[in-house]
Image (tube, grey):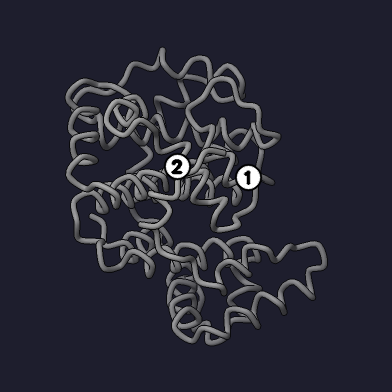
């Protein structure tokens, strides 16, 4: 991997607790749940936010969830890990959340995460759903590194992408001589994230995926394309012919993909967890 030190130095350091939680596996459920609970408890602020989000997500329950053990049991191991990452990310970038770029970035990333999870379930790959959610949330993290290095130049990237209907990575190459995929993979590798997230950052949008996590990356690529048409290219969406090579490698049809583009925002508009995520990242 190339040296992206100039971009890494502009990124925050991921908290030790979040990094540790990412390494906890579900192989021995009782031990893993206990380890997850004990790790989260080390950060009272994180614990409080997880309980708040859990109570919102479990709004139909008659009793309030008052402890982490109950929250983990009710929401599940993987969902709690996702919440930890969501909350950690919102805290890491909280000072910049009102900037136009960050509003765009987090809106795109959060919608992409929920859509990728939904596509995984639609494609009968439920075992990949939570992995797709986190990969979908993180896939564009390289954009943050490029923006932090030169906010004015990166604003041009988004303006030109929208105006000229070009892929963001193509414009990044012309203005930065690199792209958010390569930089993002470097950021996540530097943060010691598992390979699936590094590979998703590096290869999303590619029709020739070499990663062993190909199915997840294909799903994220489809969600990314559609989410971009919903937000960045909303006035003049990209043609679906650009997505054909990716769709052909999955069980997702163009008809289904178009349906998601037309209806997904309405579908998740009242989802309690989605609304909590919007609140976390201060997005409209």
Q: Are marks 2 and 1 in contact (CB under 8 Å)?
A: no
Q: In this picture, is 284 found above or below 67?
A: above
Q: Nearer the viewer, residue 180 or 221?
A: 180
The local crowd at label 2, few if under 14, some if 14 to 19, many if 20 or more residues have their Cα within 10 Å, is many
Which residue sits at x=58%, y=79%?
A: 40
Quadrant position of residue 94? bottom left
The local crowd at label 1, few if under 14, some if 14 to 19, many if 20 or more residues have their Cα within 10 Å, is some
Quadrant position of residue 161? top left
Q: Label 1's element?
A: helix
Q: Which mark is residue 183?
A: 2
Q: Nearer the viewer, residue 241 or 217?
A: 217
Which residue sits at x=41%, y=44%?
A: 142
Q: Horizontal and vertical percent for residue 200?
A: 55, 39
Residue marked by disc 1: 196
Q: Which mark is residue 111?
A: none
Q: Quadrant of the C terminus?
A: bottom left
Q: In this picture, is 228 found above or below 277?
A: above
Q: Horizontal and vertical percent for residue 195?
A: 65, 46
Mark found first going from the N terminus, 2 or 1: 2
């Amino acid at each position: 991997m190339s040296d992206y030190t100039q971009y890494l130095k502009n990124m925050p350091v991921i908290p030790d607790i979040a990094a540790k939680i990412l390494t906890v596996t579900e192989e021995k459920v009782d031990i893993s749940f206990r380890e997850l609970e004990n790790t989260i408890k080390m950060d009272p602020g994180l614990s409080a936010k997880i309980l708040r989000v859990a109570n919102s997500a479990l709004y139909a329950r008659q009793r309030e969830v008052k402890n982490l053990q109950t929250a983990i049991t009710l929401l599940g191991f993987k969902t709690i890990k996702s919440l930890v990452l969501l909350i950690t990310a919102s805290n890491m970038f909280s000072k910049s959340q009102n900037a136009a770029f960050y509003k765009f970035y987090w809106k795109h990333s959060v919608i992409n995460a929920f859509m990728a999870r939904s596509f995984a379930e639609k494609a009968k790959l439920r075992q990949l759903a939570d992995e797709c959610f986190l990969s979908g949330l993180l896939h564009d993290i390289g954009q943050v590194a490029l923006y932090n290095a030169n906010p004015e130049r990166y604003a041009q990237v988004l303006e030109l992408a929208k105006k000229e209907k070009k892929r963001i990575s193509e414009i990044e190459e012309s203005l930065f001589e690199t792209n958010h995929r390569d930089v993002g993979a470097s950021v996540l590798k530097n943060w010691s994230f598992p390979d699936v997230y590094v590979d998703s950052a590096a290869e999303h949008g590619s029709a020739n995926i070499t990663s062993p996590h190909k199915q997840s990356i294909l799903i994220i690529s489809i969600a990314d394309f559609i989410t971009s048409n919903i937000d960045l290219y909303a006035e003049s969406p990209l043609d679906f012919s650009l997505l054909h090579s990716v769709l052909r490698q999955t069980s997702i049809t163009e008809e289904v993909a178009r349906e998601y583009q037309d209806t997904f925002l309405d579908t998740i508009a009242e989802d309690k967890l989605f609304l909590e995520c919007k609140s976390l990242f201060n997005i409209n």
